[in-house]
Amino acid sequence: MTYLQQSATAAYERAKLDVKDSQASAPTAGFIAKKIVKQGHFTQGFQQLFHIVDQTQLQAVVYLPEHQLSNVRLKQQAFLKFYALSEQTFQASVRSIAPIIDRNSGTFKVILSLSNDKLLLKPGMFAQISLVFDTHDNALTVPSDAIIKRDGHSYIFVVRDNKAQEIAIETGFRQETMTEISGDIKSGDLIVVNGQRHLKNEALVNVLNANPSIATEEKPSNTLASAQ
C-alpha cells in the first residue's frame, strides 16, 4: 500500500469516526424535559444537548432539622401528598441521607425514591412529605382536642355512669388530629371533647351527641411533615 493509499484510508477512518461522534444518543429512556441547543447550532465535545427525565422513577428531596438525624434511616417508609392530587397518597422510601449538616440552616438533605408507573406525577411538583419514625401497635388514641394540659400534666374527661371523671394520662405519638395516650382508660370509653375545660370531676353530664367520641385502638405513627 502506497503512502497516498494509507493517507486516504486514515482520512476515511477519521471521517467515519467524526460521523459517529456527531450522532447523539440518549444514555437512558425517558422524556426530553429541556433542549439546550437547537437544530443547526454548532456544538463542542461533551456539551449538554438535552435534559432527559425518566418519569417512571422519581425522587423527592426533603430537608430535616439536625435533631431528627438519628430518626432517619435508609429504606425508611415515607408518604407523600401532592397538592395537585390531594385525594391520593403515594408511598416512597429513603434512598440517601446527606452525611453533613448545613451549618447555615441546621438541616440535612434526605432523598426519597418514588415509583410513578402510572405517570400521574410530574417532575417539579410540590408535596407534603411524612416520614414514619416509629409505629406502636394497638395503641389507644383520642382526639387531641380532648386533652387538657395543667401544671405540666395531661388529663381527659370520660363519661361513666352519667358523670364526668377526670383521668390523668400520659401522651405518646401524635398524628394529625389523634394522640396516643395511656392511663386508666380503655377502648370504648366516652370522651368529652367539647366544654371539658369547664367541667369538674364527678359532675353530672348528659350525652347529647348521638355519636360521641370514644377512645379507639389504632396504629399511630410519629411523623414529620415538611412541604417541599
Image (cartoon, grey):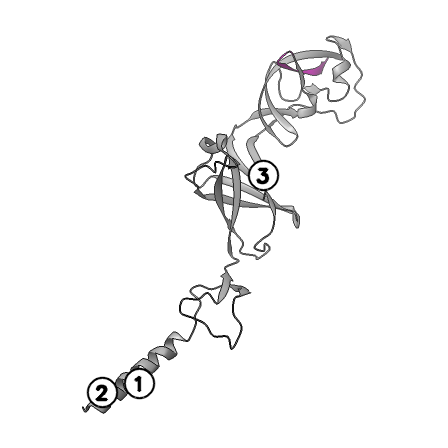
SS at badge 1: helix
Residue 223 lies in what quarter of the image? top right
Residue 29 lies, in percent from the top left, at: 47, 64
Measured Cα–Cα span from mark 2 to mark 3? 67 Å
Q: Is residue 69 magenta?
A: no
Main secondary structure of the magenta stretch? strand
Q: Is residue 153 magenta?
A: yes
Q: Residues within 10 Å of mark 2 (few under 14, many from 20)?
A: few
The single residue placed furthest to the left in the displayed view is 1
SS at badge 2: helix
Badge 1 amino acid: Tyr
Mark 2 and mark 3 lie on one chain; the one further toward the N terminus is: 2
Residue 5 lies, in percent from the top left, at: 23, 90
- 106 or 204, which lies in front? 106
Residue 6's label in the rendered image is: 2
Residue 12's label in the rendered image is: 1
Badge 2 amino acid: Gln
Mark 3 and mark 1 lie on one chain; the one further toward the N terminus is: 1
Q: Is residue 154 left or right of residue 91?
A: right
Q: Residue at x 79, y 24 (%)?
A: 209
The answer to whether the residues at label 2 and label 3 have Cβ atoms under 8 Å apart is no
**Mark 3 highlights which residue?**
226
Q: Residue at x 23, y 91 (%)?
A: 4
Q: Is residue 161 visible?
A: no
Q: Which residues are magenta?
A: 151-162
Q: Is residue 145 left or right of residue 222?
A: right
Residue 173 lies in what quarter of the image? top right
